[in-house]
Image (cartoon, rainbow, N blue to C red):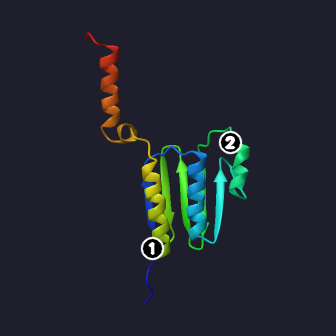
């Protein structure tokens, strides 16, 4: 009999990050993983210092992957995806630390655009604004 490893994953709300925040996330991965890979807008960077060449660009795609243990963090335009290869103590610790870090930096009004009723509320307010005497 072999035990099946359980994975951890989470889809988080969009966040607004600055270069210091990316550095902090990179350090979290370095503390917990043997190797860390960083991919930014189609470029694979050897280290965090190479991000200085991209400073003037707005980054829409970012992926941080830690190996041994495997933990990945994928920033997409409308969500953040956090995944671990298995549910070990070390990976759960990294997962929770990254998750709480990102929770503090989430965009405040994303619930309005990402909920089931949010677009309806926005459409109704837009209609009232554009047609006040209707």
Q: Where does the image place residue 51, in percent across and percent down from the top left? A: 69, 49
Looking at this view, is 66 or 47 the one in front?
A: 47
- Left/right placement of residue 21 relative to residue 131 reads right
Q: Residue 55 carries which label?
A: 2
Q: Where does the image place residue 64, in percent across and percent down from the top left? A: 60, 58
Q: Residue at x 48, y 73 (%)?
A: 86
Q: Residue 134 carries which label?
A: none
Residue 88 appears in view: no
Q: Which residue is drawn at 45% across and 77% down?
A: 5
Looking at this view, is 63 or 98 the one in front?
A: 98
Residue closest to the far left: 134
Where on the picture, by quarter, is residue 68?
bottom right
Residue 76 appears in view: yes
Where on the picture, by quarter, is residue 128?
top left
Q: What element carries label 1?
A: loop
Q: Which residue is drawn at 70% across and 43% down?
A: 54
Q: Where does the image place residue 6, in percent across and percent down from the top left? A: 43, 73
Where on the picture, by quarter, is residue 47?
bottom right
**Placement of the N terminus among the 4 image quadrants:** bottom left
Which of marks 2 and 1 precedes in the sequence? Answer: 2
Q: What element carries label 2?
A: loop
Q: Where does the image place residue 16, in percent across and percent down from the top left? A: 51, 43
**Placement of the C terminus among the 4 image quadrants:** top left
The residue beneath circle 1 is 87
- Left/right placement of residue 23 relative to residue 121 reads right
User: Within 10 Å of the Cα at label 2, are there few (<14), some (14-19), or many (20+) other Cα atoms?
Assistant: few
User: Within 10 Å of the Cα at label 1, are there few (<14), some (14-19), or many (20+) other Cα atoms?
Assistant: some
The answer to whether 112 is drawn above or below residue 127 in the figure is below
The answer to whether 110 is drawn above or below residue 33 in the figure is above
The answer to whether 2 is drawn above or below residue 104 in the figure is below
């Amino acid at each position: 009999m072999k035990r099946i490893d359980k994975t951890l994953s989470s889809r988080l709300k969009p966040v607004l990050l600055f270069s210091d925040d990316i550095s902090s996330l990179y350090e979290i991965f370095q503390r917990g993983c043997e190797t860390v890979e960083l991919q930014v807008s189609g470029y694979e960077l050897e280290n965090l210092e190479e991000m200085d060449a991209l400073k003037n660009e707005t980054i829409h795609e970012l992926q941080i992957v830690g190996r041994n243990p495997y933990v990945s963090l994928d920033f997409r335009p409308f969500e953040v995806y956090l995944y671990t290869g298995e549910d070990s103590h070390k990976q759960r610790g990294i997962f929770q630390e990254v998750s709480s870090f990102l929770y503090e930096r989430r965009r405040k009004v994303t619930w309005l655009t990402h909920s089931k009723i949010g677009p309806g509320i926005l459409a109704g307010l837009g209609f009232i604004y554009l047609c006040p005497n209707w």
